Image (cartoon, rainbow, N blue to C red):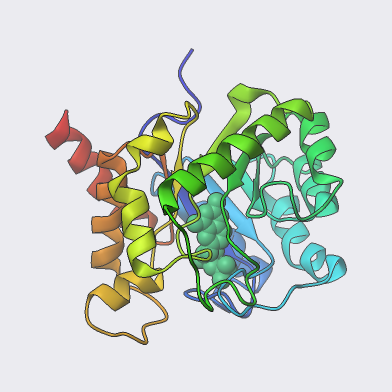
């Protein structure tokens, strides 16, 4: 049987939000989001991550009603037809999304946001992505600190993996993510990629989302950058792939599919 997510696979990002840091507003209308999701799959995305709540630094939480209003029409349109991941921390959003055909729940709180999430995912049989975050989106970039970022992220992911398994989520359905930009400085983000082998050693496939994040604009010379360019996103994705990432979460699917196919051919 072929693996569901061979290395490398691309996860396309569709933010159905007015305020996401790089594509806010672009896919807010259902028609636009549906067209983007279809295009991403045609361009080679293994899965499309649909989200109705921005988690950018400083973002305010969104109500359940509003989040459902944003994402349900997309799932109704393409849920059974395209491979969809739901980017949510709310159990009810995850439940409805999976019912409408989503096959992966991407929870940036790693089952810490909603006490009903673990059971919801376990009951659904969906894939689950557990991501590391220090603090909360509203304040996480204020002053992130670690003694050793990689060992702390590793310990967190191991603990959350154990929690999910104990709640009944099948281990072979679980993916882990270091959470680039979630309570981390530029140097923390790069160190996580440089030492990604220490997270690969946990034994579950890694998702890495560096696409367009501000660290990439900052190393290119703008200390106030809120986003990073495509060129830097591609370089970071290829570096993460080379260090062992399985799924790259990206906004520019075609370019990343091409860059990763090339890296794979070169590296063998
Ligand atoms: N990054 C963002 C959102 N969700 N999920 C995972 N697993 N990994 C990530 O790195 C990740 C994520 C933030 O990026 P984006 O969705 O483009 O922005 P926003 O949160 O502002 O909607």
Q: Position of residue 242 (x, y in %)?
A: 25, 40
In the rendered structure, the answer to whether residue 41 lies left or right of residue 198 reads right
* Image position of 144 with respect to 118: above or below: below
Q: Residue at x 57, y 52 (%)?
A: 49
Q: Nearer the viewer, residue 116 or 21?
A: 116
The quadrant holding residue 100 is top right
Q: Residue at x 19, y 41 (%)?
A: 263
Q: Nearer the viewer, residue 192 or 249?
A: 192
Q: Residue at x 47, y 31 (%)?
A: 5
Q: Position of residue 60 (x, y in %)?
A: 70, 78
Q: Position of residue 224 (x, y in %)?
A: 37, 87
In the rendered structure, the answer to whether residue 204 lies left or right of residue 71 reads left
In the rendered structure, the answer to whether residue 36 lies left or right of residue 239 reads right
* Image position of 2 with respect to 91: above or below: above
* Image position of 164 with respect to 184: above or below: above
Residue 35 seen anywhere in this rendered image of the structure: no
Q: Give the total of numbered labels.
A: 0
Instruction: Dividing the image into four quarters, tell me where ligand 1 lies.
Output: bottom right
In the rendered structure, the answer to whether residue 227 lies left or right of residue 160 reads left
- Quarter in which the C terminus is drawn: top left
In the picture as drawn, the residue positioned furthest to the left comes out as: 266
In the picture as drawn, the residue positioned furthest to the top comes out as: 1
Residue 139 seen anywhere in this rendered image of the structure: yes
Q: Position of residue 19 (x, y in %)?
A: 60, 80
Q: Residue at x 45, y 58 (%)?
A: 180
């Amino acid at each position: 049987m072929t693996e569901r997510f061979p290395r490398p696979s691309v996860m396309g990002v569709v933010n159905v939000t007015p305020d996401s840091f790089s594509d806010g507003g672009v896919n807010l209308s259902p028609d636009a989001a549906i067209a983007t999701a279809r295009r991403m799959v045609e361009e080679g995305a293994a899965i499309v991550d649909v989200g109705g709540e921005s988690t950018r630094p400083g973002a305010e939480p969104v109500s359940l009603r509003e989040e459902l209003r944003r994402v349900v029409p997309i799932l109704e349109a393409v849920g059974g037809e395209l491979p969809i991941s739901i980017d949510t921390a709310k159990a009810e959003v995850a439940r409805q999304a999976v019912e409408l055909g989503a096959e992966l729940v991407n929870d940036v709180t790693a089952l810490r946001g909603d006490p009903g999430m673990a059971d919801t995912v376990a009951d659904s049989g969906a894939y689950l992505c557990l991501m590391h975050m220090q603090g909360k989106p509203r304040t996480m970039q204020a002053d992130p600190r670690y003694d050793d970022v990689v060992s702390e992220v590793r310990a967190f992911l191991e603990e959350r993996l154990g929690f999910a398994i104990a709640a009944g989520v099948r281990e072979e359905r679980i993916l882990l993510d270091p959470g680039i930009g979630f309570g981390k400085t530029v140097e923390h983000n790069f160190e996580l990629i440089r030492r990604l082998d220490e997270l690969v050693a946990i034994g579950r496939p890694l998702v890495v989302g560096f696409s367009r994040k501000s660290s990439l604009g900052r190393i290119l010379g703008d200390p106030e950058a809120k986003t990073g360019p495509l060129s830097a996103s591609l370089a970071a994705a290829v570096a993460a792939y080379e260090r062992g990432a399985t799924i790259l979460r990206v906004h520019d699917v075609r370019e990343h599919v091409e860059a990763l196919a090339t890296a794979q051919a070169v590296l063998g």
